[in-house]
């Protein structure tokens, strides 16, 4: 059986109050600078989202040496496969010496990267994300790395940032058929590697509680379909393609009030991200039949505290996978598209 332990996934906390204060001041300056950026007009006279503007601004500022380290052709491959599409629970897409808060980027470039990063998220989530980054990586800028693929500002480009419990992308919707620019990952080990049953302080545990709220609404027959003995390995989030091949309880069989709760689960899952990425994820889901074509599964395996609050669960459709692993701490893998034939390049 594959282990659920994540390699090198131990907390790297340290006292970074002085660094955090300086970084806060720098981020505030970078955010203010964003407001003065010129609008970049595309077809239909619509401005690109701010983070996409910043990808272009960052790319244009890079020296040849910097580009040689963090810029790649669209389908560049290494021993991980097509690097642009790779996703994992704890990894660096480029050399750790090139971390986003390190000496290889100027202070202006660091400010651009940081403003770009925060622009990918719902502002109401920024404080929770800061906590996650602090708990898991000693804070923002300590251990995150980036890569740029294609040519920002063209019809194909993508920015990727990675680290412990982090894979996030920015592509200006130039990556065909997928939400978020491709598969993403998030997680949190708020109380150490092995969290207690109530996941004290975990910024993502409320998502599992929302899903468990629906389980409590199910009748006996529905629970029999929804509750499965053993979870698949967390990184197995490739598309199955047909609803009938997906284990679990079909959302189409839920009652009206249960379906309303299922929509609330989806809303809760998407809430951390900027509105344009939320919209794209919903558009992809609807293209494959919406939530009615999805199934919800809860797994007996890994039930922390044996309390019947299912730590491991999954919402899955023909081209939609949101896999939540809460044992021994939270790992979440997300893969959404409007084409179920797309391959997955994931490792956990």
Image (cartoon, rainbow, N blue to C red):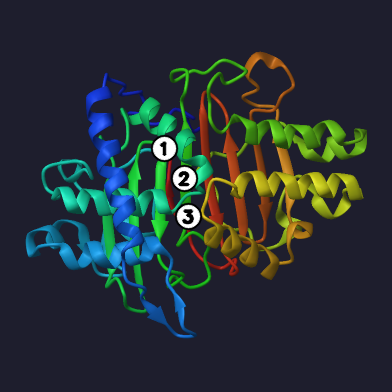
Per the rendering, the mark at residue 165 is: 1
Task: Estimate the spatial distance between the alpha carbons at disc 2 and disc 3, rounded to whole Å.
Answer: 7 Å
Is residue 230 visible in the rendered structure shown here?
no
Camera sees residue 31: yes
Q: What is the CA distance from the residue labelled 1 to the residue labelled 2?
A: 7 Å
- Are the two marked residues, 3 and 1, in contact with CB atoms closer than 8 angstroms? no
> Callout 1: 10 Å neighbours few (<14), some, many (20+)?
many
Helix, strand or loop under label 3:
loop
With 115 as the anchor, is 181 left or right in this view?
Answer: right
Question: How far is the residue under mark 3 from the one under mark 1?
Answer: 13 Å
Depicted 105 relative to depicted 134: above or below = below
- Residue of label 3: 183
Which numbered dot is residue 5? none
What residue is shown at x 87% (from left), y 36% (from top)?
218
Q: Are the residues flagged by discs 1 and 2 in contact, CB closer than 8 Å? A: yes
Depicted 241 relative to depicted 16: above or below:
below
> Which residue is nearer to you in this view: 68 or 78?
68
Around disc 2, counting alpha carbons within 10 Å, would you say few (fewer than 14), some (14 to 19), or many (20 or more)? many
In the image, 306 versus 48, the foreground residue is 48
Q: Mark 2 touching mark 3, by CB under 8 A?
A: yes
Residue 16 coordinates in the image, percent (x, y): 26, 24
Above/below status of 268 relative to 291? above
Q: Would you name the residue on which mark 2 appears? A: 185
Query: For the point 76% across and 59% down, which residue is it?
Result: 293
Estimate the x, y position of residue 347 in percent, counting from the top left: 41, 45
Q: Nearer the viewer, residue 97 or 313?
A: 97
Say left or right for 209 vs 102.
right
Q: Earlier in the sequence, mark 1 or mark 2?
A: 1
């Amino acid at each position: 059986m594959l282990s659920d332990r994540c390699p090198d996934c131990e907390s790297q906390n340290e006292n970074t109050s002085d660094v955090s204060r300086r970084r806060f001041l720098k981020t505030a300056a970078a955010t203010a600078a964003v407001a003065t950026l010129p609008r970049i007009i595309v077809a239909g006279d619509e401005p690109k989202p701010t983070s996409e503007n910043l990808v272009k601004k960052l790319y244009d500022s890079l020296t040849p040496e910097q580009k040689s380290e963090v810029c790649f052709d669209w389908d560049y491959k290494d021993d991980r496969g097509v690097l642009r599409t790779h996703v994992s629970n704890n990894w660096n897409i480029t050399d750790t010496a090139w971390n986003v808060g390190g000496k290889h980027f100027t202070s202006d470039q660091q400010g651009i990267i940081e403003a770009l990063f925060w622009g990918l998220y719902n502002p109401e989530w920024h404080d929770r994300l800061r906590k996650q980054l602090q708990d898991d990586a000693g804070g923002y800028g300590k251990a995150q790395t980036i890569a740029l693929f294609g040519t920002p500002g063209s019809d194909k480009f993508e920015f990727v940032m990675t680290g412990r419990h982090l894979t996030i992308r920015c592509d200006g919707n130039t990556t065909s058929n997928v939400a978020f620019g491709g598969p993403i990952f998030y997680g949190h080990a708020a109380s150490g590697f092995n969290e207690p049953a109530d996941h004290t302080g975990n910024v993502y545990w409320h998502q599992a509680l929302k899903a468990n709220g629906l389980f409590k609404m199910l009748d006996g027959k529905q629970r029999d379909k929804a509750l499965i003995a053993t979870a698949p390995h967390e990184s197995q989030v490739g598309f199955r393609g047909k609803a009938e091949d997906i284990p679990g309880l079909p959302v189409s069989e839920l009652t009206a009030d249960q379906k309303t709760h299922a929509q609330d689960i989806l809303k809760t899952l998407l809430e951390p991200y900027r509105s344009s990425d939320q919209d794209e994820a919903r558009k992809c889901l609807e293209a494959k039949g919406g939530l009615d074509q999805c199934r919800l599964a809860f797994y007996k395996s890994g039930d922390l505290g044996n309390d019947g609050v299912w730590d491991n669960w999954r919402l899955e459709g023909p081209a939609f996978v949101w896999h939540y692993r809460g044992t021994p701490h939270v790992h979440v893998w997300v893969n959404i598209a409007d084409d179920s034939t797309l391959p997955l390049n994931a490792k956990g």
